[in-house]
Amino acid sequence: MPLHWKLVIDCTDPHRQAAFWAAALEYRIEDHSALIERLLSAGAITPDLLTEVDGHNAFRALAAVRHPDEPFDPVSDTGLGHRLLFQQVPEEKTTKNRLHLDLHPGPADRDATVQRLETLGATALRHVKEPGGEHVVMADPEGNEFCVQ
């Protein structure tokens, strides 16, 4: 049986990163407030681990986005399909990513997608033309590289 997985991305501001990537991918930001309330009531977590985002409790150091059409746990709102989890770390990004996302809008929509991502806070770093095709290398608001094919 295949393993379920999620991509975890270290960052300094998980909620800003989740907002950017939810808009970029047209994903849904997971709402863990019901899970948080149960954990608080059970004494399993303390309020200092939390923050408020869009009027509801959220984990201070974690935020996630999920594909809107894939299965999710209705109790915790945790995605069970394509999912990105952003976890807070104290240090900023300092070197090139060893892993990155490739977005595939297709050649006809590449420029419009790059422009849309720039309005969301991404930066176009370079346009690459290779014998196998073209893509734009971009950086998200914290400098993590990704490609638009």
Image (tube, rainbow, N blue to C red):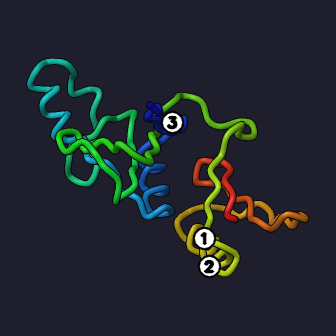
Hey, what amino acid is under mark 3? Answer: Val
Q: Please state which of residues 5 and 96 is positioned toward the viewer in this rendering.
A: 5
Residue linked to disc 3: 8
Quadrant housing the N terminus: top left
Q: Is residue 85 left or right of residue 77?
A: right
Q: Earlier in the sequence, mark 1 or mark 2?
A: 1
Which residue is situated farthest in the front direction here? 1
Q: Earlier in the sequence, mark 2 or mark 3?
A: 3
Residue linked to disc 1: 105
Residue linked to disc 2: 112
Q: Do residues under tags 1 and 3 come within 8 Å of each other at their CB atoms?
A: no
Image x and y of residue 4, in percent: 43, 35
Image x and y of residue 49, in percent: 29, 27
Q: Do residues under tags 1 and 2 come within 8 Å of each other at their CB atoms?
A: yes
Image x and y of residue 39, in percent: 17, 26
Q: Residues within 10 Å of mark 2 (few under 14, many from 20)?
A: few
